[in-house]
Amino acid sequence: MSVLDVGGVANLRDVGGIAAGSSRVRSGVLLRSGHLAGLTAEGGAVLAGRVRHVVDLRDDAEVEREPSALTGVPITRVPLFLGSVGSFFAQNMDLTAMYRHLVDESAPRLADAVRVIAAGEPTLVHCTVGKDRTGVTVALALSAVGADRDAVIGDYALTASQLPRERNRAIVQYLRAHLPDATNAVQLATESPAPVMARLLADIDGRYGSAAAYLRDAGMSDAELHALAEALLE
């Protein structure tokens, strides 16, 4: 995987290069990032030259607040959370519980997002910071084609180091001032611990057999899962 420096976009990287059995994930076919609202003109030109489709996992309010600045590239919106993002903070969920909620309540939407990747065009998947919804979607897609588990978890964990420090400081200050009893709020907003993704993928394996079986149960066909492998693997 490689971190990319594109003006106005945080947490942008290409997951190509991850081993998958005797193969590996192609470079240039699956990128992930935070939102594109701050994209510079130069950054937009770079992205438009690299990707042919964008999957935006945010809800209506998030899109209205921070609309994408990328032009000329088709965007498929797949809002993953049922309800507002703020509800997870209000309920004081930790990341493990939030991800379990996501895979249980939004399975058809996760399958829809992965279907776009399976179409085979160079695709960028993003949410607001590219951590949770993006992290789960990308981990499922990679795991469904047999990507190395440790590398998938490592890609997820990398996010925490890619979030802008000034953004994290401002959010932590806000959370401590406005949600002092929400003990999990800072984790929800700023962290991507490897054990959390390891538990999620192990839980999916335990309940469904594999990430591919989970996506099949969520509505993807065998042909679509085959297309996903054809798209992602060398």
Image (cartoon, helix red, strand yellow):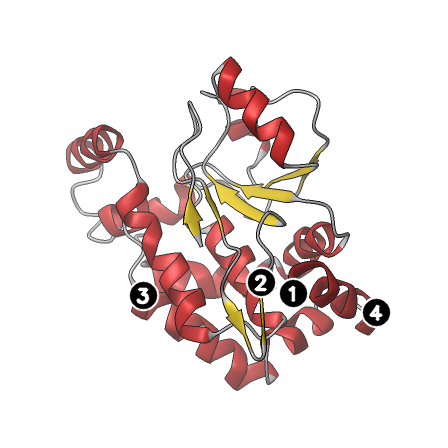
Q: Where is residue 186 in the image (x, y as percent from the top left)?
A: 23, 46
Instruction: Please tell me whether residue 11 is drawn above or below residue 139 in the rendered image.
Output: above
Question: In the rendered view, does 172 fall on the left or right side of 113?
Answer: left
Marked residue nearer the N-terminal end (3 or 2):
2
Give me the C-alpha separation between circle 3 and circle 2.
20 Å
Q: Where is residue 190 in the image (x, y as percent from the top left)?
A: 28, 45
Name the mark on residue 25: 2
| Quadrant into which the N terminus falls | bottom left
Q: Residues within 10 Å of mark 3 (few under 14, many from 20)?
A: some
Give me the C-alpha separation between circle 1 and circle 3.
24 Å
Give me the C-alpha separation between circle 4 and circle 2.
19 Å
Helix, strand or loop at mark 4: helix
Question: Toward the viewer: 161 or 46?
Answer: 46
Q: Which residue is drawn at 73% across and 46% down?
A: 121
Residue 190, can we see it?
Answer: no
Asked if the residue under mark 3 is in contact with the one under mark 4, i.e. CB atoms within 8 Å, the reply is: no
Marked residue nearer the N-terminal end (2 or 1):
2
Asked if the residue under mark 1 is in contact with the one under mark 2, i.e. CB atoms within 8 Å, the reply is: yes
* Residue labelled with disc 3: 194
Q: Position of residue 30 (x, y in %)?
A: 59, 50
Helix, strand or loop at mark 3: helix
Marked residue nearer the N-terminal end (4 or 3):
3
Q: Residues within 10 Å of mark 1 (few under 14, many from 20)?
A: many
Give me the C-alpha separation between circle 4 and circle 3.
31 Å
Give me the C-alpha separation between circle 4 and circle 1.
15 Å
* Residue labelled with disc 4: 223
Q: Where is residue 232 in the image (x, y as percent from the top left)?
A: 65, 60
